Amino acid sequence: MAVGHSVDRLWAHHDRGLLDEPLTRLVEAHRALSNAERDVTFYRVLLQRLASGDLPVDQHLFARIDRTVSQLKDAVGTRDARQGDALAELESLEAAAPVRAMAEGKDLIAHEFAALLAISRGAKVHEHLQTGRTSVVTASGVRLTLSVLQRLEEAGLVARDTSHPLHAGQPISLTDAGRTTLTGTGRPPAATPTPAPRVGSWPTASGRSR
């Protein structure tokens, strides 16, 4: 991972003006993504309410549904763009200062760390009954590739609940090592003296959305 504090701590450092320019850009990109995700949730819930059957079915309802669908589409487009911005900032930080993951000495590249962050908010792996294709979907609606999930599993960062059938969806959760990787806590003492860490590192997945 490219940085090493929790989301909450990193945001607090930003508000106190303690971050350097690259980390400041990352926090601002993450906040923009979080706000965009909130808008997607708002319009999705509104659309569900409009289609729930609780409101009179008339031309006014149709107009509200059309307008909400358009707003939801715009919000999703904005969310996807903000997610790209946040990933670009992560990749920039990683390129400038590559670091080691906290599990089994494996390196996490930016999109894998972003996947771990998304999984921390909830995720499931499904196998489609007809096609046999396996997909990984997070609670925020982000789809991950199976290869990324398998790399995180091999690194001991995530685990599936195999008590559920794959076609019904197997919940994915962070292991202790996965949580440590995100929070940057619980590191073993170094064999030789090391300099004090700089203020501000990449956040754990705490529930901003991200």
Image (cartoon, rainbow, N blue to C red):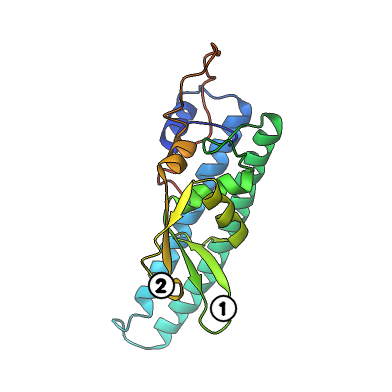
Give the residue type that dot 2 points to: Pro
Element marked by disc 1: loop
Q: Is residue 22 above or below residue 18?
A: below
Q: Is residue 146 above or below residue 119?
A: below
Residue identifier under label 1: 132
Which residue occupies the foreground of this view, 194 or 94?
Answer: 194
Q: In this view, which residue lies farthest toward the top?
A: 193
**What residue is at 46 percent from the left and 80 percent from the top?**
63
- Quarter where residue 96 is shown: top right
Horizontal side of 206 relative to 109 (left or right) equals left
Give the number of the disc on residue 173.
Answer: none
Give the image location of residue 82, x and y in percent.
59, 51
Which residue occupies the foreground of this view, 199 or 71?
Answer: 199
**What residue is at 38 percent from the left and 68 percent from the top?**
45
Quadrant, the N terminus: top right
Q: Is residue 115 visible?
A: no
